[in-house]
Image (tube, helix red, strand yellow):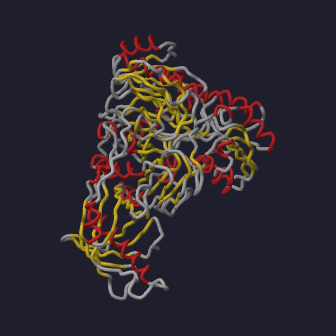
């Protein structure tokens, strides 16, 4: 067995590998860029080596620097994680030639299956059903349009070396095929150093289901059940679960056996995933093979009780698989939510900056040998006070739950999301909460188009209606009452001017445009019982008990005997006196005041924000990679104005209306802040 391994990656996957290596008694080496010098994975590892500037193409994607770090530290093996160099056949070959073990498949398997074009040819030769398409690399956007028309729209334009949703577009017409081809090539070049692109038929209303494999160097390959990955936004997975609520045992067996046959055809060793697109009738077609560990591997670990990272390390060290296909378990139900640094209320644009608060829910499991222990797990690469840079992927954590069945897992996940505290940046937690509560998700009636269908016009606060809005009002009053009670006990108050607790309040729910709601409430404390109160909101009554401290962001307790977890933040950017409450994805800003103060507040005029309609503003922090207009140019609505790159994705800004460019206010190559003006129209 190895005594020291190097993790050629960053973030949560680097931390994940370090955790298993530590459990196995193996020392670890982290590598880091300028942007990651204070990152969590650097602090967790036994050693750390600096490998270059923040941009991944100058650090994490430079094979020479990774190999040099191995030699410098004496690392015997390299775990590539996912992304970066994990599916680069040339890198794995070079590592092997240098006498270093690659903790992953052999380079010939990576080359055969990691290349999306060649893998389809091999799959076809192995008798695996493949989606109709053109598997040869396409050189020009004009040729892409020609091929797309021949196949018939819609088509999927994909980077051959792509993965994780990067370098992938769906086109429904010639214009989208032309523009999608160009964007795919650019993203593929920047993310993978390989800009080859191919086109295939897009199967409408598909489900994305994948088979997890593990193989050893002794010719053994088994499949570890399936994962349902159909909840996707822009081809990026959002929620994954195992098992799938859709396929039958017969389909599971057929998909697994085909995946194993394909893996054996290329002498596959290590962990890998064969992805299928599955139709309504449970017919399935080979999509691609990921020759690496997947982001969503924890849900498989939960239901099988296996540590996939440990298995990868043991296989790389030459050990045989410790179990047969017949011994693979399927116990309970697991769900994973990807927690991304993005703002769902601003069209999911990246959100970067400092994590003022980062407090995940309490973990009741980690991994490995916990098949009879259902609970919560968090995999993350960030920590309190850390920086979320704009150079890398937006995912900052994975929240995983393991339940007795699917309904139990959904309930556990909703409660865990309630207790996940993130401040300083925006996250997609409200969106995840909305998905988990959606009737179609709960029933298992969805496909890969679910998010586009249900949230085609974007995501708004109204998309997360609370099942009991009065509870949030009652909770605000409860928190304010507890605060007043504490203030009343402080010494040094002048006689006759001390803090009065009171029982009658008005909860002002603040709204944009000044359309605030004013709700009278009455609060009674239970005699002799601290941390409790009965709150009346109209005809409803809420008996709330909580031992959480006043300054806790996440508070837990019971309401009318039912457990709850909610978040309360004192002070908002617009109002330091406000209380911001979050529960089940719903967020409200409130003021809890006396009835007289509420009357006066209602008389205050609303101050309208300045009119910025003449400007094109940066919707996110990022790098301005292109400005497509010049002063004096006439621009039509929908015309490209600028391109911003953030978190490895290109974001194109279009003109909202016809106009003439007055000034260009930001230069190409400039780092932008949120709402920074780029172009002014006259």
Residue occupying the point 41% across, 32% down: 615
Q: Residue visible at 45% across and 11% down?
A: 143
Residue 245, compared with residue 162, is above or below; it is below
Give the mark count: 0
Residue 473 appears at what percent x and percent y? 30, 66
**x 47%, y 68%: residue:** 552
As drawn, the residue found furthest toward the left would be: 539
Residue 621 rendering spot, x and y as whole percentages: 51, 40
Instruction: Classify 7 as above or below 146.
Output: below
Residue 224, percent from left and from top: 50, 45
Which residue is at the front of the view, 400 or 514?
514
Q: Quadrant of the C terminus?
A: top left
Task: Identify the residue at horizontal 41%, vertical 34% (top origin).
Answer: 234
Q: Is residue 165 left or right of residue 57?
A: left
Residue 557 falls in which quadrant of the image? bottom left
Residue 144 vertical placement versus 20 (above, below): above
The x and y percentages for residue 521 are 25, 72
Residue 273 visible here = yes
Image position of 138 with respect to 560: above or below: above
Between 519 and 108, the one lying in front of the other is 519
């Amino acid at each position: 067995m190895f005594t020291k391994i190097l993790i050629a990656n960053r973030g949560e996957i680097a931390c994940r590998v370090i955790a298993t290596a530590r459990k196995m008694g193996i020392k670890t080496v982290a590598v880091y860029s300028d942007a990651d010098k204070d990152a969590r994975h650097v602090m967790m590892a036994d050693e750390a080596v600096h490998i270059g500037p923040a941009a991944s193409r100058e650090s994490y994607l430079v094979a020479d620097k990774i190999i040099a770090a191995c030699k410098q530290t004496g690392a015997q093996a390299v775990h590539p994680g996912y992304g970066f160099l994990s599916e680069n056949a040339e890198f794995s070959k070079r590592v092997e030639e240098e006498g270093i073990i690659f903790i992953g498949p052999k380079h010939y398997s990576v080359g055969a299956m990691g290349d999306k074009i060649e893998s389809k040819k091999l799959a076809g030769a192995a008798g695996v059903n493949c989606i109709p398409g053109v598997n040869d690399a396409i050189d020009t956007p004009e040729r892409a349009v020609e091929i797309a028309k021949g196949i018939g729209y819609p088509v999927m334009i994909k980077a051959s070396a792509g993965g994780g949703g990067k370098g992938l577009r769906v086109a429904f017409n010639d214009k989208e095929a032309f523009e999608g081809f160009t964007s795919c090539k650019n993203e593929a070049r920047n993310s993978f150093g390989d800009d080859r692109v191919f086109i295939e038929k897009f199967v409408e209303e598909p489900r994305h289901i994948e088979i997890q494999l593990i193989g050893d160097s002794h010719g053994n390959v088994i499949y570890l059940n399936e994962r349902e990955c159909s909840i996707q936004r822009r081809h990026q997975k959002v929620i994954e679960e195992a098992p799938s609520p859709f396929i039958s045992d017969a389909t599971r067996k057929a998909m697994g056996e085909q995946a194993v046959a394909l893996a054996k055809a290329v002498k596959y060793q290590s962990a890998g995933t064969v992805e299928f697109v599955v139709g309504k009738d449970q017919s399935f077609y080979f999509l691609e093979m990921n020759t690496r560990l997947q982001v969503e591997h924890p849900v498989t670990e939960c239901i099988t009780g296996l540590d996939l990272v440990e298995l990868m390390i043991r296989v790389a060290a030459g050990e045989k698989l410790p179990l047969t296909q017949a011994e693979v378990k399927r116990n309970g139900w697991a769900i994973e939510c990807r927690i991304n640094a993005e703002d769902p209320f601003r069209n999911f644009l990246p959100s970067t900056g400092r994590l003022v608060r980062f407090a995940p829910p309490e973990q009741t499991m980690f991994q490995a040998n916990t098949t009879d222990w259902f609970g919560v797990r968090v995999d993350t690469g960030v920590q309190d006070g850390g920086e979320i840079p704009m150079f890398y992927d937006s995912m900052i954590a994975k929240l995983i739950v393991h339940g007795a069945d699917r309904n139990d897992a959904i309930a556990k996940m909703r409660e865990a999301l309630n207790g996940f505290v993130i401040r300083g940046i925006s996250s997609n937690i409200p969106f995840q909460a909305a998905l988990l509560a959606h009737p179609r998700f709960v029933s298992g009636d969805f496909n890969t188009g679910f998010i586009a269908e249900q949230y085609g016009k974007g995501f708004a606060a109204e998309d997360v209606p609370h099942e009991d809005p009065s509870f949030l009002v009652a909770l605000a009053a409860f928190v304010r009452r507890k605060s007043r009670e504490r203030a009343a006990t402080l010494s040094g108050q002048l006689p006759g001017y001390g803090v009065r607790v009171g029982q009658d309040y008005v909860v002002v729910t603040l709204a944009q445009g000044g359309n605030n709601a004013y709700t009278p409430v009455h609060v009674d404390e239970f005699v002799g019982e601290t941390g409790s109160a009965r709150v009346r909101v109209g005809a409803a009554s809420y008996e709330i008990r909580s031992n959480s401290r006043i300054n806790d962001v996440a508070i837990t307790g019971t309401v009318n005997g039912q457990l709850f977890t909610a978040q309360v933040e004192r002070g908002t950017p617009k109002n330091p006196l406000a209380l911001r409450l979050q529960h089940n994805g719903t967020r409200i800003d409130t003021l809890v005041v006396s009835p007289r103060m509420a009357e006066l507040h209602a008389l205050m005029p609303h101050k309208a924000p300045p009119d910025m309609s003449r400007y094109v503003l940066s919707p996110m922090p990022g790098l301005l990679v292109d400005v497509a207009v010049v002063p004096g140019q006439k621009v039509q609505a929908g015309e490209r104005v600028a391109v911003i790159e953030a978190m490895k994705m290109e974001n194109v800004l279009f003109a909202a209306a016809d106009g003439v460019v007055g000034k260009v206010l930001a230069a190409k190559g400039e780092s932008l802040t949120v709402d920074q003006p780029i172009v002014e129209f006259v």
